[in-house]
Image (spheres, rainbow, N blue to C red):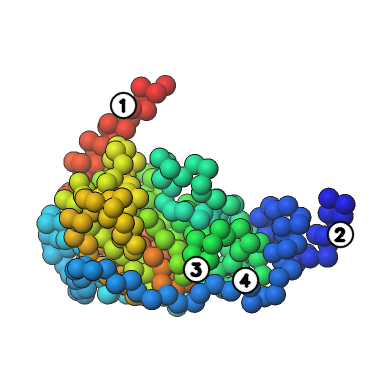
Amino acid sequence: RARPSAELAANAQHAAAATLWLPASALASARGRASSSFALPSSLPELVVEGARPVEKRAGLSEDEMTDRFVHSKPVVLTDAQREWPAQSKWTFEWLGAKFGEEEMPVSDLAPFFQQCDRGNIQTVKVSMREYIRYILGQPNGIRSLQKSDEQVFYGNGWCPFMQHDDLLSDVSDRLYCVRDSVPRGDGPARGFNTSLTKVFLGPAGTISRLHHDTYSTHVWLSQIRGRKQFICYAPEDTEHLHCHPEDDYDGRTSLFDPSAPDFNAFPRARNARAFSVVVEEGETVVLPSRWWHWAKSLTPSITLMRNFVNEVNMKDYMQIMERAQRAKAQRK
């Protein structure tokens, strides 16, 4: 570059911990655009899935009623799980940017990571929370110019803040009122394991979690603190129809079948899979039993609290998979 310092100086917008590293010309180009070019959609329509069944929405479930749903592998959306959570009013994008602006996090344009096909295709960038919030809000930022297309946005689905910021848990909860969760809280290693199972997902409208079920046969719940998110789900018995890749269950299962744009020529068995579809509104929480497949898309800018867990219903499967994973790890040494 003839004048890299001049380029940077002329286009600098000073903000602490804006740690996205780009070539000077790319950063200058991104920062130098009209502000309107940074805008992302604020709202997207719900996808219509032919033949999809709804996921029941309930409130006031008892622990026994919820456990029965795990036993019979029935998902549910709880409309009252966030009751008394301060995060309902406190957690805004602006607040996260101000409170955790210097904290760095990875954001990716494909999620979750599919090991069989994503190497060489996925873009993952480490950015400050402040820079990512600017991206979500459509303010000048260095991320927007990296998008491969308007539809393929960057998703922050790897933020695990609760080990470093245990006070943040007072705004939410890692337990739901009607859900039995057998993971011990404790101190030391137990605390580290427990907090690693609770994450915060955030991003603009259009973030997508591709079709998968979660690792180690864990149950999962996802609570919408901000925004709306559509989930398209399939029961465990549809696994054979979803052309999943044969990774071991400790890595979870993944499928390249896209229920939002089904290609039945490439995935013919998927015609036999029966979808469930639900929009989880702000303040609601979807609970998916072990091995339930799910694809998700944020319809508006979104903040989601996610928790993986085990209880008496899936504990045996979890332990068997954990033992198998440990044996495989030992054999690789």
Q: CA distance from mark 4 to mark 1?
A: 48 Å
Q: Which residue is mark 3?
A: 204
Residue type at mark 3 is Pro
Q: Which structural element holds mark 1? A: helix
Tell me the kind of residue under disc 1. Answer: Arg
At 31% from the left and 26% from the top, the residue drawn is 327
Q: Quadrant of residue 316?
A: top left
Q: Secondary structure at mark 3?
A: loop
Q: Earlier in the sequence, mark 4 or mark 3?
A: 4
Residue 57 locus on image (x, y percent): 22, 73
Name above or below for residue 68 compared with residue 85.
above
Name the residue carrying label 2.
6
In the rendered structure, are the residues bearing label 2 and label 4 in contact, judged by CB atoms less than 8 Å apart? no
Q: Secondary structure at mark 4?
A: helix
Classify residue 294 by image quadrant.
bottom left
- Residue picked out by circle 1: 327
**Residue in the image at 42% along x and 75% along y:** 44
